[in-house]
Image (spheres, rainbow, N blue to C red):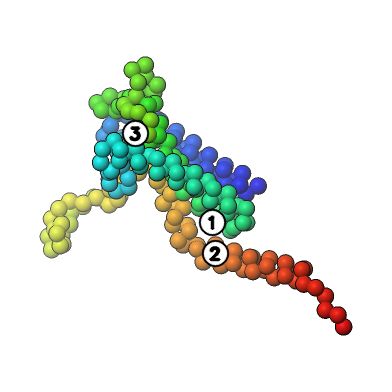
Amino acid sequence: MKLYKAYLIILVILMIDQGSKIWVKTHMMLYQSEPITSWFNIYFVENEGMAFGMVLPGIMGKLFLSVFRLVAVFGGVWYLRKLVKENQHWGFITSVAMILAGAIGNMIDGTFYGIIFTDSHYRVAEMFSAAGGYGQALTGKVVDMLYFPIINGVFPRWFPFWGGEPFTFFNAIFNVADSAITVGVFIILIFQSRFFVQNELETGASAGVAKTETAEPVAD
């Protein structure tokens, strides 16, 4: 039952993630911004590499990254099933499922979006165009759109390095998959003592019961 619940968590996150990405790709041009509130915008960008804008050079670098994501996802599925089989803490299983869902979501972009969509430069992308996509399999770009410019200001003149320059907090642009990964990691970091200590206690108790049941009776 836990495994099915974990798969359901993954499915729901993937539906929200891919639904939002497909909507953005088919309704907005690259770098187009739609303000929702004063502190939240839908801002369409595409990530060609890894986190924080890092990029592996050339087509081989892109292929390596996509293959690495595929391997990581299959490894994550195996690990999730292992956790369920070992009856690990449900909170830990949920966190791993969230991280896995985020990894699958971004993997789908990198694996398939290049052949599904046309490019988004100065136009709204088309799905399954007769002219083909903007790339090949495993060469797609990850779609990001969540932008929270919560605070806009200027660094004081006395501030080192950036004194007098404008700043925005929070200026990262990400997607639902990234959010799932981040939240899952933070849950593990915050509640790790509860997750792992409880599992150790349960494992120790199970071992003690097994040892008692298998012990031979002592003759008087």
172 relative to 192 in the view: left or right: left
Give the residue drawn at x 77%, y 68%.
213
Residue beneath label 2, please?
196
* Front residue (pair 102, 80): 80
Position in image of residue 157 (x %, y %): 12, 60
Identity, as a three-letter code, of the amino acid under mark 3: Thr
Query: Cβ–Cβ below 8 Å for labels 1 and 2?
Result: yes
Q: Secondary structure at mark 2?
A: helix
Give the residue drawn at x 35%, y 21%.
132
Residue beneath label 1, please?
92
Distance from label 2 to label 3 (Cα)? 39 Å
Quarter of the image for the C terminus: give it: bottom right
| Picture disc at residue 218 | none
Does 99 sit above or below residue 198?
A: above
* Front residue (pair 112, 21): 112
Quarter of image, res 134: top left
Position in image of residue 27 (x %, y %): 35, 27
Disc with the residue nearer the chain's start (1 vs 2): 1
119 relative to 154 in the view: left or right: right
Q: Secondary structure at mark 3?
A: loop
Residue beneath label 3, please?
139
Distance from label 1 to label 2 (Cα)? 9 Å
Distance from label 1 to label 3 (Cα)? 33 Å
Does 76 sit above or below residue 187?
A: above
Quarter of image, res 109: top left
Does 100 sit above or below residue 129?
A: below
Give the residue drawn at x 50%, y 62%.
191
Position in image of residue 68 (x %, y %): 40, 44
Mark 1 surroundings: few (<14), some (14-19) or many (≥20) residues within 10 A:
many
Disc with the residue nearer the chain's start (2 vs 3): 3
